[in-house]
Image (cartoon, rainbow, N blue to C red):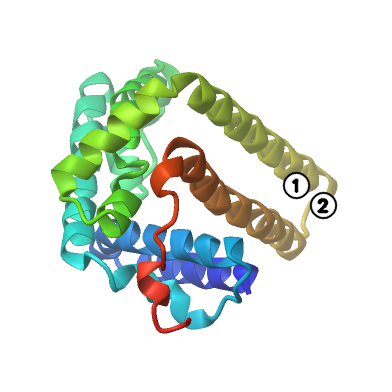
Amino acid sequence: MWLFLVFTYWIAVALLGQIRYLGPATSTVLLPAFSVSFMVMCAVLDRGGLLHPALLFAGFRSGLSTLIALGVLSLVSIVVVLGVASLADSGALMTLILSGQQPPIEALQDGSVLSAMLVATLAATPVAMAFWFAPVLAAWNRIGAAQSLFYSFFAVLRNWRAFFVYGAVLALAGVVFLVAVTVAAFLMQGKVQVLHSLALILTLLSLPTVFASFYASYRDIFPENAVPAEPPSNRENP
């Protein structure tokens, strides 16, 4: 059921992504609510409960207005980060992300796109720190968007060593993923469907683990309020 719910969410985001501009914007705005849904699922499993499909929308039942506000702020932050990065490559990276249009050859050859990616990474780091725990803090602790962003940022900052190791492990896993797909592409020349199936299987194996790791980090850093006495979205299930 955990795999099914993650896969359902992944498919929904992919379908939304087919709607130019509006789709990705909508999925970004709704991301905080869905992230709370997965936190609720983890809390239910942590208590020995059973998952069911309705939990995919559990995050929409508690503090939805604050979560939508966080989603809007996240969308604005992404645009600002891309705007800052565009100073390094005249907007080539922004065009690639927003419209899928390939950057000019000149931008790739002179390294400006790479520079823009580095700038974007640096600019996005404090944003990611602020939004890491903000949704679940807003939903489970009933605090406002600004306060949740503040607490999240300094919680990550105070535990930067652990998050550095966490990020390094994720980066290493990403490299292994790319190497596996590249090797498979080399060995299966002309077998596109097999390659797509392999990529899908690897994605389905990695995403659930990554989603669960968000809950694990919350439990470690906020042990005093790790899980409400009764998860807000699971009150109907005693």
Mark 2–mark 1 Cα distance, whole angstroms, equals: 5 Å
Q: Residue at x 61, y 68 (%)?
A: 2
In the rendered view, does 7 fall on the left or right side of 62?
A: right
Which amino acid type corresponds to the residue marked 2 in the rendered image?
Met
Residue 185 got which mark?
1
Q: Residue 129's image quarter?
A: top left
In the rendered view, does 236 fall on the left or right side of 131?
A: right
Against 216, residue 195 (above or below) is below
Determine whether the residue tagged by mark 1 lies in a helix, strand or loop. helix
Residue 92 visible in the displayed image: no
What residue is pinned by disc 2? 188
Neighbor class of circle 2 (other Cα within 10 Å; few <14, some 14-19, many 20+) is few
Residue 161 visible in the displayed image: yes
Dots 2 and 1: beta carbons under 8 Å? yes
Comparing 205 with 213, the one in front is 213
Against 30, residue 217 (above or below) is above
Residue 238 got which mark?
none
Q: Whole-percent x and y of residue 8?
A: 52, 73
Q: In which quarter of the image is the N terminus?
A: bottom right
Q: Whole-percent x and y of residue 65?
A: 16, 64
Q: Whole-percent x and y of residue 48?
A: 63, 68
Comparing 149 with 196, the one in front is 149
Which amino acid type corresponds to the residue marked 1 in the rendered image?
Ala
In the rendered view, does 89 fall on the left or right side of 217?
A: left
